[in-house]
Image (cartoon, rainbow, N blue to C red):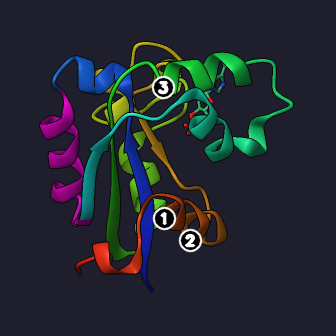
Amino acid sequence: ALERTLSIIKPDATRRNLTGKIAAKFEDAGLRIVASKRIQMTPAQAGVFYEVHKERPFYGELCEFMASGPVVVQVLEGEGAIAKNREVMGATNPKDAAPGTVRADFAESVGENSVHGSDAADTAAAEIAYFFSGLELVG
Ligand code: CMP
């Protein structure tokens, strides 16, 4: 089915001018970038976004990191976009990521892992709505 998913290019990647190289991997995989903006979150805004992880030991560090610099939030659209984006990203820990994936090529560590992508249809819908209004999605 035609799906939409939320992608975030994280501060470790924007800092190293990797926005274009990462976006090219999405487009090369057949994903269309139907919305895109560069923002900087506060730790509290990152905390709301990552609320599902609030009991994890790394939650505080994760929120500080996500607020430490600009991020590029994008909505990717395509057939099976949620799974396809996760394939292009590679495993959460770059040590486990398949060659050629974003995280294998660019991520610095499990925490500073260059990209986030929604993991399921319900989270994708909620994550897109957190950053974008319907008018900002142009397919
Ligand atoms: P992401 O897909 O953005 O969703 C939750 C994030 O938590 C994950 O990517 C990692 O960047 C981060 N994370 C997962 N495990 C750890 C960890 N052990 N230490 C720090 N951050 C982590």
Tell me where residue 67 appears, x and y as whole percent: 48, 25
Name the amino acid, label 2: Ala
- Position of residue 49 in the picture relative to residue 16 (left or right): right
Q: CA distance from mark 2 to mark 3?
A: 22 Å
Look at the numbered disc 2 and give the secondary structure of its residue.
helix
Tell me where residue 56 appears, x and y as whole percent: 81, 27
Q: Is 25 inside the magenta-drawn segment?
A: yes
Which residue is depicted at the point 60% across and 66% down?
126
Tell me where residue 106 appears, x and y as whole percent: 30, 22
Which quadrant does the C terminus fall into? bottom left
Q: Which residue is mark 3?
A: 67
For the magenta stretch, what is the residue range?
A: 18-34
Rendering quarter of residue 101: top left
Pointers 1 and 2 in contact (C-beta within 8 Å): yes
Tell me where residue 136 appears, x and y as whole percent: 29, 72
Few, some or many residues within 10 Å of mark 2 (<14, 14–19, 20+) = some
**Of labels 2 and 3, the one closer to you:** 3
Name the amino acid, label 1: Ile
Q: CA distance from mark 1 to mark 3?
A: 18 Å
Q: Is residue 55 visible?
A: yes
Q: Which residue is mark 2?
A: 125
- Position of residue 38 in the picture relative to residue 51 (left or right): left
Q: Which residue is mark 1?
A: 128
Name the amino acid, label 3: Ala
